[in-house]
């Protein structure tokens, strides 16, 4: 595995912890694997902490202070690094996503968050939280739009998404919202910023019938997979599980429409919603 890259400690509390962990480990003359043994985790997990792709948990912060002789540095700073604008079950995945060089995702029921418009995201969150106050919805929508700024970079991360046809057909927020959302998606495709393939209803049973999955790759850490359900999610670096999810994504690609046919379907659906809005 490539050595850990230098992080900018001013970029985030997590980057500070990662940089300090690397410094303390090297000062002790320990490898990532040796530190991992003391925490009962893998060396790659320590590498992910140093790279900022994993969140440091309080129990590990305490053990790191003991193993590296850093008094209570990691314990004191762990709480600050754990603060996030995202829901608890998704926070670590969102922060890893921001450091990924490649993201492969299957979305079963909705347009993926990175590809959503503000109006579409608002409709989704209002469905999730029908009694939430306006400021709560706005905070959630703003956080999602901030995530989407990942795509401001013209080349990285490489985002390859399989979207189920159900996400195109489910009326979310009304015809105008859907038309705008699909035109936005088509625009990203036409600008060659993302690769999108639609898994059509005609594909029948497929490899991810049980839900969505996201795979993330990094230059300096092992790949991760993330699966999500209602108010729950699991981020994993377990090699067999990541390999299984990678195989799952490949099977989905094989069952999906080509990128060109997918774009045609997306734009056709957008046109249908536009006509519905005018009717």
Image: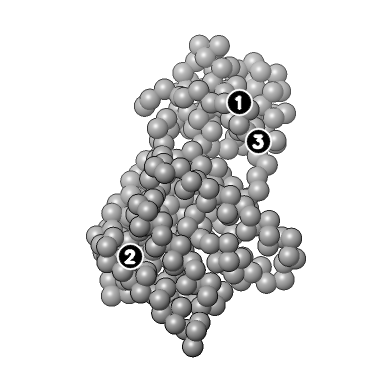
Label 2: which secondary element? helix
Residue that label 1 marks: 9
Q: Which mark is residue 263?
A: 2
Residue where numbered disc 3 is placed: 81
Q: Residue 245: give x, y in percent of width and height.
A: 36, 51
Q: Is residue 56 left or right of residue 96?
A: right
Picture layout, residue 6 above or below residue 158: above
Dot placed on the residue nearer the N-terminal end, 3 or 2? 3
Q: Quadrant of the N terminus?
A: top left
Q: Residue furthest bottom?
A: 279
Q: Nearer the viewer, residue 236 or 263?
A: 263
Badge 3 marks a residue whose secondary structure is helix
Q: Find numbered disc 1 in the image and state the secondary structure of the residue it sits on.
A: loop
Q: CA distance from mark 1 to mark 3?
A: 12 Å
Check disc 3: other Cα within 10 Å, few if <14, some if 14-19, many if 20+. some
Is any atom of residue 182 visible in this view? yes
């Amino acid at each position: 595995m490539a050595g850990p890259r230098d992080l900018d400690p001013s970029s985030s509390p997590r980057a500070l912890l990662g940089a300090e962990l690397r410094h303390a480990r090297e000062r002790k003359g320990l490898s990532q694997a040796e530190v991992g043994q003391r925490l009962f985790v893998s060396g790659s997990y320590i590498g992910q902490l140093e790279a900022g792709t994993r969140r440091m948990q309080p129990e590990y912060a305490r053990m790191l202070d003991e193993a590296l002789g850093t008094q209570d540095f990691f314990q004191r700073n762990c709480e600050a690094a754990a603060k996030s604008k995202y829901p608890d079950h998704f926070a670590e995945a969102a922060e890893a996503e921001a450091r990924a060089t490649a993201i492969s995702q299957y979305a079963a029921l909705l347009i993926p968050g990175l590809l959503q418009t503000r109006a579409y995201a608002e409709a989704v969150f209002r469905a999730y939280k029908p009694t939430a106050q306006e400021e709560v919805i706005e905070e959630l929508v703003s956080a999602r739009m901030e995530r989407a700024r990942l795509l401001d970079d013209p080349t990285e991360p490489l985002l390859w998404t399989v979207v189920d046809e159900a996400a195109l057909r489910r009326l979310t927020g009304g015809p105008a919202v859907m038309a705008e959302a699909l035109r936005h998606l088509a625009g990203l495709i036409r600008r060659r910023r993302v690769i999108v393939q639609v898994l059509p209803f005609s594909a029948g049973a497929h490899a991810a019938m049980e839900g969505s999955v996201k795979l993330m790759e990094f230059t300096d850490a092992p790949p991760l997979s993330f699966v999500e359900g209602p108010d729950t999610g699991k981020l994993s670096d377990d090699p067999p599980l990541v390999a299984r999810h990678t195989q799952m994504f490949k099977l989905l690609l094989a069952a999906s429409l080509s990128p060109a046919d997918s774009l045609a379907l997306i734009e056709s659906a957008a046109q249908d919603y536009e006509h519905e809005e005018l009717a």
